Amino acid sequence: LVDNEMEDVLRQLKDRISRLEGVLRLEKKITASGGKIFATNGKRADFYTTLKKCKEAGGSIATPRNLGENNAILYFVKNFNTYAYLGIKESLIPSKFQFLDGTQLNYTNWHLNEPSGKGEE
């Protein structure tokens, strides 16, 4: 009987999550790629606030590791007509970039002559 009750609770939770994801998709605040979920609250913030909000939500700032993930991030840029911060920083070697944890990038999709080093990248 306990197993049946647990299965019922799990089914109800899955249904609730599915409905919530549907609402967020309608509001263009969530998308997915390769089993990862990308989300936004649609608000503008500085880089450090963005890092904090991502952590508070149980996630991390977006770090595109392939074309699909890059497109998921681009989805928000286009829908909200804004920029997006990425979990990437310039390394100690000028013009070389890495993930925030220091690991090297294995995927990039820069525009021609970017990053240029002018202003904040």
Image (cartoon, helix red, strand yellow):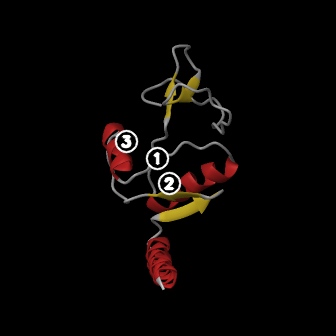
Q: Earlier in the sequence, mark 3 or mark 2?
A: 3
Q: Is residue 60 above or below residue 116?
A: below
Q: Secondary structure at mark 3?
A: helix
Residue 106: x and y, percent? 68, 33
Kind of residue indicated by mark 2: Val
Tag 3: amino acid: Leu
Real-space CA distance between mark 3 and mark 2, rounded to the nearest whole angstrom: 17 Å
Which callout, 3 or 2, points to the residue nearer the camera?
3
* Residue 45, percent from left and from top: 32, 46
Of the pair 92 and 8, the residue shown nearer to us = 8
**Which is nearer the N-term, disc 1 or disc 2?**
2
N-terminal of the pair, mark 3 or mark 1, is 3
- To which residue does mark 3 refer? 51
In what element is the residue under mark 1? Answer: loop
Q: Which mark, residue 77?
A: 2
Question: Does the CB distance between marks 1 and 2 fall below 8 Å?
Answer: yes
- The residue positioned 33% from the left and 37% from the top of the image is 48
Residue 64 vertical position relative to residue 93 in the rendered view, above or below: below
Residue 18 image point, x, y percent: 50, 77
* Label at residue 84: 1
For discs 3 and 1, the disc positioned in front in the rendered view: 3
Residue 120 lies, with reference to residue 34, above or below; the image says above
The residue nearer to you, when weighing 20 against 73, is: 20
Residues at circles 3 and 1 in contact by the CB criterion of under 8 Å? no
Rendered residue at 50%/54% (across/down): 77
Amino acid type at mark 1: Ala
